[in-house]
Amino acid sequence: MSELPNDPRVDQAKASDEGLLDAHESALGKQHAPDGAKYRLLPIAILFTLSGLILFAGTYLNRYAGHYSARIFNENAKPSSGAPAAVKIDPVALGKTQFNAVCITCHQSTGLGIAGIYPPLAGSEWVNGPSARLIRIVLYGLKGQITVEGHAYGAAAMPVFGQVAGSAYNWNDEKVAAVLTYVRQEWGNKSGPVTADEVAAVHKAIGDRKEMSEAELEAVK
């Protein structure tokens, strides 16, 4: 049986897939898309690289962005050297703290001491006299009798407070200066402050030694 040249079944059997697609597109009034417009998947390597960069960026921001807090992350902050700012300590406040922690037991909150045992600090000629004497008393301690405003005291020795051999408290120069500044301005006393440099100078000049005596202190001008 001979094939009819115009038989549509014959044409369909010989048609290729691309021919059928072109036929359908032509029937729907569509134009054939150029090869360059066809979608192509990115290589797997590029996808992995992009995914890694995204993961790294998210981790970096989570760790170093300061949780986006204005206290930690401030894009408007002025440049800084990074060194912490030194906190200025009020010597009178520090001296009061040191006095209330230790000295108050003997000299009392009123600065009047205890008659015959602990000398007063309020109105004392030793407190309001040369600071070099007072520094020595606190740095090295005082042993033996001392006369304050015409009254003798000596039942108890003044302990050693400075950073010297045998010190019971080991106060640094700043603490010694602060407590002396405090007592020279408290209870009606109106003497000048004592600096840490003054304390350091006395310590350097004398070095380590035993407690001072009244006679040695009177020789200091």
Image (cartoon, rainbow, N blue to C red):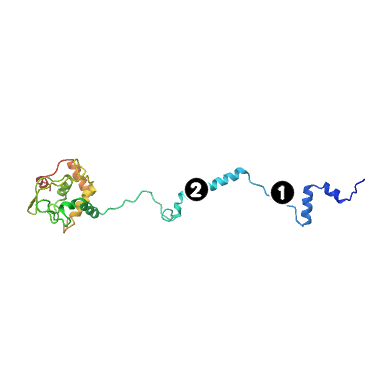
Q: Which quadrant: the N terminus?
A: top right
Q: Is residue 54 visible?
A: yes
The residue nearer to you, when weighing 69 against 74, is 69
Q: For mark 2, does the 10 Å Cα neighbourhood hold few (<14), some (14 to 19), or many (20 or more) residues?
A: few
Residue 210 in percent (x, y) is at 15, 41
Q: Mark 2 highlights which residue? A: 59
Q: Nearer the viewer, residue 102 or 77?
A: 102
Q: Amino acid at mark 1?
A: Asp
Neighbours of disc 1 within 10 Å: few (<14), some (14-19), many (20+): few
Expressed as whole percent of the image width and height from the top left, the position of residue 162 reads 20, 45
Tag on residue 35?
A: 1
Q: Is residue 10 left or right of residue 192?
A: right
Residue at 83% of width from left, 49% of height from top? 12
Residue furthest bottom in the image: 188
Q: Is residue 193 visible?
A: no
Q: Are marks 2 and 1 in contact (CB under 8 Å)?
A: no
Secondary structure at numbered mark 1:
helix
